[in-house]
Image: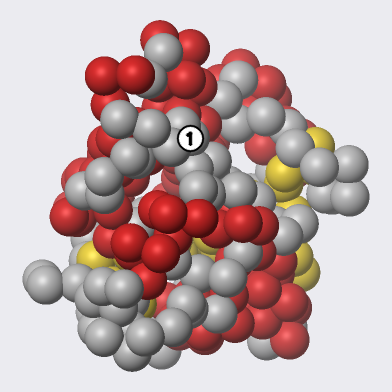
């Protein structure tokens, strides 16, 4: 039985991924700020994240979903605190979680890492400068890791969903959601379960020759 760590695993895409991988026979460990998580940790705290993941020990699979939408406002109105908090969770948190699990995967000769980025990280979304910038960073980090680990048996890929029906979408200004949804050719929001199906493949032995890649799941929105 393989062990899968799902950050942000209590709700939204993370919860869907936790359920899907559990159905595939994985031992699933959720990490989140919510009390219902198996491990309660704020990934913006790099030292606390390292300590928490050290206590968990080696894992075979990491699905990194933990994120915040950040401020919904023009970039020039974003405060220092709002910017720093968004980057701390979305980008620095990705760094901290990946750094903690990779040595064990290398030692085992097998691992799968999937980060959840966003089409906003590819295209940029108005009123979401901090979020777009942080998710662009996640894409770049994932591509770099894929190349660094390409001969180790550890594959690292990222998924770029458009708006998905999750609590994060509910926390986003309605005008922003409307703008983003209108740009989806399939004319609807994504579902967490649809993202989880892609994650299930990327974290399996069936995925064997793809690393450092960006997988679109946007109902046709993404232009590249």
Image location (x, y in percent) of residue 153: 35, 65
* Camera-nearest residue between 116 and 85: 85
Residue 115 x/y as whole percent: 42, 56
* Left or right of residue 34, residue 72 in this image: left
Is residue 87 left or right of 215 when viewed as pictured? right
75 shown above or below 173 = above
> Quadrant where the N terminus lies?
bottom right
Inspect this view and state whether residue 110 appears.
Answer: no
Q: Is residue 220 at least partly visible in the picture?
A: yes
Residue 54 position (above or below residue 29): above
What's the residue at 60%, 48% (across, down)? 171
Image quadrant where one finds the C terminus:
bottom left
Choose between 170 and 101: the one closer to the eye: 170
Residue found 89% across the figure and 50% down from its top: 36
Give the residue drawn at x 75%, y 37%: 33
Q: Quadrant of residue 59?
A: bottom right
In the foreground, 142 or 86: 86
Q: Mark 1: few, some, or many residues within 10 Å (few <14, many ≥20)?
A: many
Name the spot of residue 177 as percent of width and height, x first.
44, 60
- x and y percentages locating residue 98 in the rendered image: 46, 42
Closer to the camera in the image, 165 or 224: 165
Residue at the top extreme of this rendering: 80
Which residue is at a point 50% across and 55% down the rendered structure image?
A: 174
- Under circle 1, the secondary element is loop
Q: In the rendered view, would you say 13 is above or below 143?
A: below
Residue matched to label 1:
70
Question: Residue at the right extreme?
Answer: 36
Query: Which quadrant of the view contains residue 205?
Result: bottom left
Task: Give the mark count.
Answer: 1
């Amino acid at each position: 039985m393989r062990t899968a760590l799902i950050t942000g695993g209590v709700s939204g895409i993370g919860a869907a991924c936790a359920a899907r991988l559990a159905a595939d026979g994985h031992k699933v460990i959720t990490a989140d700020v919510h009390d219902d998580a198996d491990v309660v940790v704020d990934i913006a705290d790099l030292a606390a994240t390292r300590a928490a993941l050290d206590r968990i020990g080696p894992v075979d699979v990491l699905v990194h979903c933990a994120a915040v939408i950040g401020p919904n406002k023009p970039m020039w109105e974003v405060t220092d605190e709002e910017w720093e908090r968004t980057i701390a969770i979305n980008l620095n948190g990705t760094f901290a979680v990946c750094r903690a699990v990779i040595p064990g995967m290398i030692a085992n000769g097998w691992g799968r890492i999937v980060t959840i980025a966003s089409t906003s990280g590819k295209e940029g979304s108005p009123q979401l400068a901090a979020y777009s910038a942080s998710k662009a960073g996640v894409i770049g980090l994932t591509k770099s890791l894929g190349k660094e680990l390409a001969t180790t048996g550890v594959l690292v890929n990222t998924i770029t969903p458009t708006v998905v029906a999750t609590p994060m979408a509910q926390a986003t200004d309605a005008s922003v959601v409307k703008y983003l949804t209108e740009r989806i050719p399939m004319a609807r929001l994504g579902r967490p379960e649809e993202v989880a199906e892609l994650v299930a493949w990327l974290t399996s032995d069936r995925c064997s020759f793809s690393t450092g890649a960006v997988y679109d799941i946007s109902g046709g929105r993404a232009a590249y």
